[in-house]
Amino acid sequence: MKTETAIWQSIKKATSDKVHWTRIEARVGSGVPDLNGCTDKGEFWIELKACKTNRYQTKGLWRPQQIAWQMKRACIFANVFNLVSHPSLQCCKIYGASKVFELHLGNAVKPDLTLSYPVNWQRLLDHVGSNMDLVNDCA
């Protein structure tokens, strides 16, 4: 999936029977993630990113406002995730919001979950659901 729109369409098609989705059409500069989802386990947010380089590189994918929103929210609400699609590697990598700053700098960060193409989106929902009650330590 080469674009955020393609990622969104794939997620929506596969999970709309399990998730009430809202696609956020954020104004430039707001920092709010692309997707808000709600299941019987709770509410969560997902920022979509598509890596357009042959090498897996996350440096510069996030705007400062997106980093600030996620870092602040991660301290009080752990249900914020980043989904980075990499067409050349044929996978999507999922990271919790507390890792967004290191990702933005281009540092090597271990993903919380890797989903190979074709993506089984139920695995994403299972991961999100299993992390609903976790609280990040921002002290």
Image (spheres, rainbow, N blue to C red):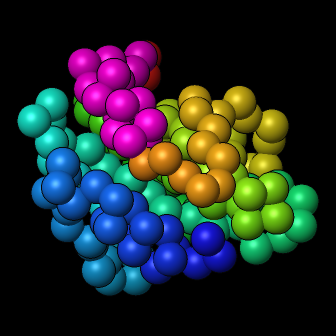
- Which of 63 and 9 lies nearest the eye of the viewer? 9
How far from the left and from the top, in percent, is residue 31?
39, 65
- Indicate whether 107 appears above or below 85: above
Q: Which residue is drawn at 76% across and 73% down?
A: 52
Going by the image, does 79 lie left or right of 4? left
Q: In which quarter of the image is residue 57?
A: bottom right
Q: Quadrant of the C terminus?
A: top left
Q: Residue at x 66, y 47 (%)?
A: 116
The residue range painted magenta reads 122-137
Q: Residue at x 50, y 77 (%)?
A: 6
Q: Residue at x 84, y 70 (%)?
A: 53
The number of numbered discs placed on residues in the rendered structure image is 0
Going by the image, does 113 lie left or right of 48? right
Going by the image, does 127 lie left or right of 94? left
Residue found at the very far right of the displayed protein: 55
- Which of 117 and 130 lies nearest the eye of the viewer? 117
Residue 133 in view, yes or no: yes
Q: In which quarter of the image is the N terminus?
A: bottom right
Going by the image, does 93 lie left or right of 6? right
How far from the left and from the top, in percent, is residue 21?
20, 62
Does the magenta run of residues contain 55? no
- Which of 35 and 16 lies nearest the eye of the viewer? 16
How far from the left and from the top, in percent, is residue 62?
58, 63
Does the magenta run of residues contain 128? yes
Residue 72 in view, yes or no: no
